[in-house]
């Protein structure tokens, strides 16, 4: 329940940042390196952000066959980020979207 609530908060923040497109959005940027943390706040933030983004993109540009509460898509994105240090300074939303689209494209 707590993870679902956190994902909802992150999704709301994501929608606000996406809608405003202002310099505030620039300040709210989360880099993919956040997802390389072993545990704690940064990893929880990363996991919630990716899960909320995946839910937001589902059926539009991502067509994942797994349930929304299944962490396998989030785990796959984090694994990809850890394996690609050259992308760790990029925005986690951009990286996660690319990875999710490759994993589960809508045909």
Image (cartoon, helix red, strand yellow):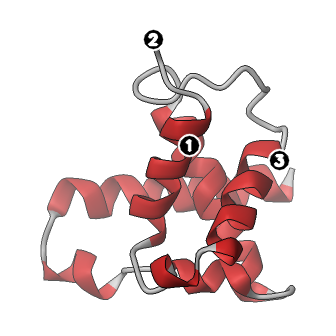
Q: Earlier in the sequence, mark 1 or mark 2?
A: 1
Residue of label 3 = 71
At 80% from the left and 57% from the top, the residue drawn is 3
Does 30 sit left or right of 15 as displayed?
A: right
With respect to residue 7, does 32 lie above or below? below
Asked whether 102 or 44 is in front, the reply is 102
Q: Is residue 105 above or below residue 29?
A: above
Q: Quadrant of residue 75?
A: bottom right
Q: Are marks 1 and 2 in contact (CB under 8 Å)?
A: no
What kind of element bears circle 3? loop
Q: Which residue is mark 1?
A: 100
Question: For mark 2, does the 10 Å Cα neighbourhood hold few (<14), some (14 to 19), or many (20 or more) residues?
Answer: few
Q: Position of residue 38 (x, y in %)?
A: 85, 87
Q: Is residue 92 above or below residue 37?
A: above
Nearer the observer, 93 or 41: 93
Residue behind mark 2? 107
Which residue is painted at 46% across and 62% down in the image? 95
The answer for how far apart the CA atoms under marks 1 and 2 are is 14 Å
Looking at the image, tell me whether mark 3 or mark 1 is earlier in sequence order.
3
Question: Which one is closest to the eye, mark 3 or mark 1?
Answer: 1
**Residue pictured at 41% horizontal, 24% vertical:** 60
The kind of secondary structure element at disc 2 is loop
Evaluate whether residue 56 shows in this view: yes
């Amino acid at each position: 329940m707590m993870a679902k609530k956190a994902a909802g908060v992150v999704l709301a923040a994501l929608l606000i940042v996406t809608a405003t497109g202002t310099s505030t959005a620039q300040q709210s940027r989360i880099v993919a390196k956040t997802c390389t943390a072993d545990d704690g706040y940064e990893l929880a933030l990363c996991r919630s952000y990716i899960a909320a983004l995946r839910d937001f993109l589902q059926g539009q540009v991502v067509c994942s066959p797994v349930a929304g509460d299944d962490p396998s898509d989030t785990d796959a994105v984090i694994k990809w980020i850890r394996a690609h240090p050259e992308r760790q300074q990029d925005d986690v939303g951009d990286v996660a979207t690319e990875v999710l689209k490759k994993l589960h494209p809508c045909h």
